[in-house]
Every structure is written in structure tokens, then in C-alpha cells.
Amino acid sequence: MAVYQDGDITIDEDFARFGSKSFAINKINTVDVREKKGSITPVLVLLIIFLLTATHWFEIKTFGSGAVALFFLACTALAWKFALITHYQLFLMTSSSQAQAYSTTDKRRVMKLREAIERSMIRRP
């Protein structure tokens, strides 16, 4: 009987299955969720490229150079958006080694998954 099932993830009394990876519940020592914040580095790199070349584009004053400038500004805006995304990673520490089992941007989903694994761990003798 599955304690938790969502897509290709299944947790039952004996195994935690993540697609093709399986972890035996009785071998899991610790379940850990870590937050990984996005990086601002891509935004800074795109801004530096834009600022270094902006003078040249505006001196030419052609439609093509303005389109290139708008393209770089759009890329910078997208990089900024992705820099604000937080990824949540579920780590299972087993008796043999540490393995990352799952990563998502949905905090609620990863917390439900963690609770399901912990419930299965408690049920083990």
C-alpha cells in the first residue's frame, strides 16, 4: 500500500521510489530538505555586456542596434526572474552514503514528500 504517490514518485512501507531510483526505507537514516536560492551572477554578466556595448549601439542609431539592445534587456529581465527562483532539494542520508533524491521549486510538494518518508520510517520495526 502506497503511503504517498505523485507521478513517478511512490513511497510505501518498504521503498521510496523516485523514477528509476529506489531507496530502502530501513536503510534511510535522515531526510533533509535544503533550499537553494537562484544566482544573481547571470544578471550581472548580461548587464555588464549590455553596458559595455550600449554606447556603440546608440552611436550607430539604426533599428538593428536598437533591436539588439532590446534583446539584451529582455534577456536580462528573464535572467533576473530566474535568479529569484528557489529550488528545494530532498536529500536522503542512507547507511551507505548521501544521495539527492528529488529537486523542485514547489516547497509544499517537497515537504509532503518528506513527511511521507518520515511516516514510513516510523512504521519500520
Image (cartoon, rainbow, N blue to C red):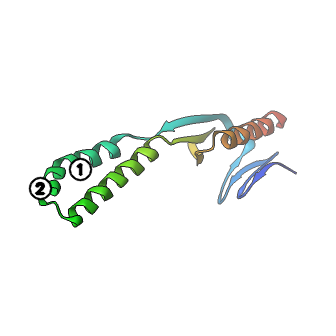
Measured as percent of width and height from the top left, residue 98 is found at 56, 40
Measured as percent of width and height from the top left, residue 110 is found at 66, 42
Residue, disc 2:
59
In the image, residue 14 above or below residue 8: above
In the rendered image, which quarter is residue 18 located in? bottom right
> Residue 35 or 70: which is nearer the viewer?
70
In the image, residue 114 above or below residue 64: above
In the rendered image, which quarter is residue 100 located in? top right
Judge the density around disc 1: few (<14), some (14-19), many (≥20) Cα neighbours within 10 Å. some
Give whichever of discs 2 and 1 has the lower sequence position: 1
Count of numbered badges drawn on the protein: 2
Q: CA distance from mark 2 to mark 1?
A: 14 Å
Judge the density around disc 2: few (<14), some (14-19), many (≥20) Cα neighbours within 10 Å. few
Q: Residue furthest right?
A: 1
> Residue 26 or 66: which is nearer the viewer?
66
The three-letter code of the residue at mark 2 reads Glu
> Residue 120 or 43: which is nearer the viewer?
43
The three-letter code of the residue at mark 1 reads Phe
- Which numbered circle lies on residue 50? 1
Judge left or right: residue 18 versus residue 67: right
Is residue 109 among the parts visible in the rendering? Answer: yes
Is residue 125 among the parts visible in the rendering? Answer: no
Judge left or right: residue 81 versus residue 63: right
The residue located at (43%, 43%) in the rendering is 83
Measured as percent of width and height from the top left, residue 75 is found at 36, 54
The residue located at (59%, 47%) in the rendering is 104
> Quadrant location of the C terminus?
top right
